[in-house]
Image (cartoon, helix red, strand yellow):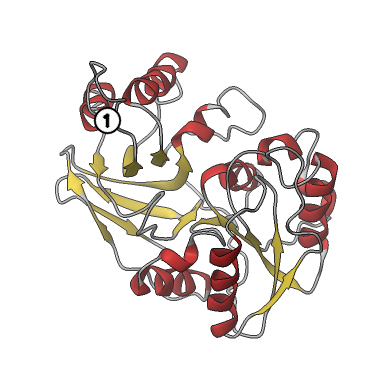
Amino acid sequence: MQSKILPPSLQPGDLLRVIAPSGALREFEAFGRSLEIWRSHGYRIEVIPNIDEKWGYLAGKDENRRQQLAAAWQDPECRGILCTRGGFGSTRILEDWSWQSLNNPIIPKWLIGFSDITTLLWSLYAAGISSVHAPVLTTLVDEPDWSIQRLFDLLEGRPLAPLKGCAWGGGVVSGILLPSNLTVATHLLATPIQPNLDGVILAWEDVTEAPYRIDRMLTQWRLSGALAKVRGIALGSFTRCEAPPNIPSFSVEEVLRDRLGNLDIPIVSDLPFGHGSPNAALPVGVLATLDADQGVLSINM
């Protein structure tokens, strides 16, 4: 099994482009403070004009957001792409999209984000390029110091410490790590964006999804056959995923155990990534080891 192409490591002084491929920017104070974190590490940051553009719940019309992404990807000076926020919208800009058509030969660069940005991360993975599942520019400022340092360690080519979670048992497995937001990834099943899932370790997180909706999504994964050759599952935080009050329900933890516990693959839960803090940076498309007896996820970059 081959890992994907790693873009060149970043170093202070590199130019990074800020784009808004998904939801409309609302959290301006957090956005500004997160930009300062990047600048304080020595990076040159270029924010696209009209970063606060709105078209309904989207950060501008599809063609405008698509052009932002294409321009950043094709800019030879730009070494990385920072996403403002998630929400919804990145899937729309990937209709009739091809990374290969933007550069020939394709020139990889880091793309950084999570939540709705899952669509871009998975699309790049399918094109053979690694990216980073990590805080966006409206959430980075809320991260603890160790999580922020982990992001820069990843991008600048330093080793990453293992993450510790709750061991479900099932042994130790190695595979290509594929992090995502569960809801977004579920909606990519059976689309051209869905990558080959054979031999991967899926890493899932989510936010504000009631337990019955988590159940519905996991049941779709089971029925679709998409889990047939997955090697392991790493579960992050499922933030604010409680049932509505006064309605009979399982807890989200019970749903996860019920829908995943009989797959006979290694599973580790409660790992520190996802919505809320901390959201530990995870590379997409690199070899990882999941120890479901010790509850540890290790990155083998």
Residue labelled with disc 1: 252
Q: Nearer the viewer, residue 78 or 103?
A: 78
Could you tell whether 299 is left or right of 193 in the image?
left
Instruction: Name the residue furthest front.
Output: 246
Q: Position of residue 282 (x, y in %)?
A: 43, 57
Q: Position of residue 256 (x, y in %)?
A: 27, 29
Q: Which image quarter: residue 144?
A: bottom left
- How many marks the image carries: the answer is 1
- Quadrant where the C terminus is found in the figure: bottom left
> From the viewer's perspective, is residue 174 above or below residue 108?
above
Mark 1: amino acid: Val
Picture residue at 27% right of the left edge, 30% below the top: 252
Q: Position of residue 262 (x, y in %)?
A: 22, 23
Q: Position of residue 219 (x, y in %)?
A: 38, 17
Q: Nearer the viewer, residue 190 or 22?
A: 22
Other residues around mark 1 within 10 Å, as few (<14) / some (14–19) / many (≥20):
many
Picture residue at 78% right of the left edge, 74% below the top: 77
Say which element carries label 1.
helix
Could you tell whether 33 is left or right of 171 in the image?
right
Picture residue at 54% right of the left edge, 34% below the top: 196
Could you tell whether 264 is left or right of 206 in the image?
left
Q: Nearer the viewer, residue 21 or 201?
A: 21
